[in-house]
Image (cartoon, grey):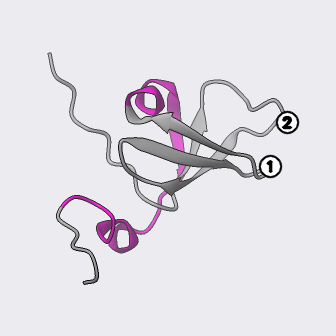
Amino acid sequence: MTRPVLEVLLGDVVRLRRRHPCGGDAWLVDRLGADIGLRCRTCGRHVLLERRALESRLVTFLERGDPTLSAGVGPGATAGA
C-alpha cells in the first residue's frame, strides 16, 4: 500500500515525537528536497532528516509555511526564473 506524499512547506513549524536534547520541541523547516532541513526553534541547531523519517516522526504542524515560497524550490521550478 502506498501512502500519499506529505506536503511540507518552507517555513512550516513542526512538532516531532521526541524532544531535542536542549528541551525544545518545535522545529522550523528551512530546506526541502530528498532530505528535509530542520532548525530547532529553541537552540538553533540544524539537522537533516530523510523525508521518510520526518513523515514517521511528525506529530503535528504548529504553523504552516508559505506555499508560494515553497513553489520556487518544489518540483517543476526552473532555475533563474
Pointers 2 and 1 in contact (CB under 8 A)?
Answer: yes
Disc 2 or 1, which lies upstream in sequence?
2
Quarter in which the N terminus is drawn: top left
Quarter-of-image position of residue 16: top right
Q: Position of residue 69 (x, y in %)?
A: 39, 72
The residue most toward the bottom is 81
Per the model, the C-alpha gap separating discs 2 and 1 is 7 Å
Side of 5 where 24 appears, left or right: right
Q: Amino acid at mark 2?
A: Cys
Estimate how packed mark 1 is, as few (under 14), some (14 to 19) or many (20 or more) residues with alpha carbons within 10 Å. Answer: few
Q: Is residue 67 above or below residue 55?
A: below
User: Magenta stretch: residue 46 in it?
Assistant: no
Q: Residue at x 33, y 65 (%)?
A: 73
Label 2 residue SS: loop
Q: Amino acid at mark 1?
A: Thr
Q: Read off the residue under disc 2.
A: 22
Residue 34 marker: none
Q: Read off the residue under disc 1.
A: 42
Quarter-of-image position of residue 14: top right
Q: Position of residue 50 (x, y in %)?
A: 44, 33
